[in-house]
Image (cartoon, rainbow, N blue to C red):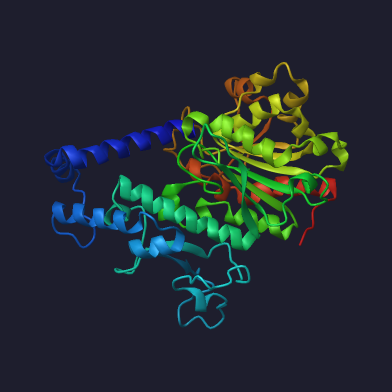
Amino acid sequence: MGNTFGCCLVEEEECYSSLLIEAPKAVKACRNFERHPLLWGCTTEEEESAEVARVLQSIKHRHGREGLHTAGFEYRLEACSLHHPPADNEDACDIVEEKKFALQEEEDITERERCEKCCTRLHHTASNTRIEDANRSLFIVDGDMYDEICRLCQEVAQEFMQKEANLKWITLCEDDAHDVPLRALVHRDYRKEEEAKSQQPTLLIATGNGKVCAGIFSRKHLLTSGIEPSTALPMLREAKKRGMRSALITPNARGKYYTMNTFQKSLSALFTSSSIIQQQPRKQNRIYVVAHSASGGYLTRHLLTSPQLLPRIQAIAFTDSTHNIQWTKHNPTLQSKLQDSSSLYLRSNDVRSLGGKEPPKQTGSKADTDSFWRHRFGSIRTLWAGTNDHSLMHWSAHDVIWGHFDRHCASSSRCKHQ
């Protein structure tokens, strides 16, 4: 599901980039036909090309906030109407009034008070403009510039997640066959041999296919909707409240042809060792999984080949997962797990009939399941996510997911509720 859309996007961007180099007249005709605006501050296509080249060169070896600042962008915390009210509203709270401008490197964001409706949005600094879907191409053109700004925004978002959830990067494995080492974001006191002995449960978040990195659900929404709706940050906050550890993996680290292999190696490195396998399952810490899109399929296949992890999984929230219950017909234990009360399936819309054109169903309401659906996913409890956007399911259904986890967290008596 996510893979198809991701491939289309990549192909479109590659075609556009090649047109810029090989057929400027065709690009000009295309622009005139679509009435596509030139990059902000440019009056001709030559100026635009020069500006894009300048930006790409300036950020080539830069990362995170430094690179984003060099490119002319910054993230700003935008307070909601309650926390940044009109001047005549004397009763409103002002807990983030002082933090509505650009976020500074030295700011201790782990101590900042939070509101679910306050959002960290990307802004174009020179024009003091918030980036939205309607104006994104005016400030970030498709192609290489889009990819590089997305890279920087993902790095900034990961910095936020590291600080708020007290995470660190660890290298899971390196081998000569790949230039890119496998890494994961985990809690700072992570020790593989001691992981299963911990009494603290672990939240595992696996995002979908494409070019997204650990903890990122959507590059597009990271640019146009904000850090909170497009990343795992809200989930990490909830995990921290409950005294849970967290682990974020990157199935796409080595490209689309190695995603399954990357997923399996990541989970094996994080949660499997000789000492852990020798322990009784009841003495091992519990894992709560958010498996988005293709990662739901990867998780199911991994559990078929690595059954020792299954007893540790306390609950699973599948969001538009691509798995198939028929894969498990020779594994009744796993088949039962994927359909019992510990598993939940959230769907963004009825892709076979509505195509996202009708209003989304109410968040958490029971989804219609026909014989085709039951053949594919079995009798798993299936609810509407409350959105037609595949990439915003975790944001829209946030409370539903945590309600599901809390019910099973309470039953295990290992979570700290606040």
Residue sitting at the far top: 330
Question: At 35% across and 64% down in the image, what residue appears?
Answer: 70
Which one is nearer the viewer's eye here, 70 or 379? 70
Q: Write the residue at 74% across / 43% down.
A: 287
Quadrant in the picture for residue 375 = top right
Q: Find residue 83 and report its horizontal and vertical position in percent.
A: 53, 73
From what the image shows, is residue 101 above or below residue 37? below
Check the image and report above or below for 33 versus 78.
above
Q: Residue furthest front?
A: 176
On-image quarter of the C terminus: bottom right
Q: Is residue 364 visible to us here?
A: no
Question: On the rendered structure, is 280 left or right of 316?
Answer: right
Q: Quadrant of residue 266?
A: top right
| 151 vs 207: above or below | below
From the viewer's side, name the closer residue of 403 and 3: 3
Residue 145 x, y percent position in the rendering: 32, 50
> In the displayed structure, does residue 368 sit left or right of residue 154?
right
The residue under the point 44% across, 37% down is: 356
Q: Quadrant of residue 364?
A: top right
Looking at the image, residue 251 sits to the left or right of residue 87; the answer is right
Q: Is residue 282 above or below residue 83?
A: above
Q: x and y percent of residue 303 in the render? A: 70, 29
Residue 243 shows up from this direction: yes
Residue 203, how many percent across, how many down? 69, 48
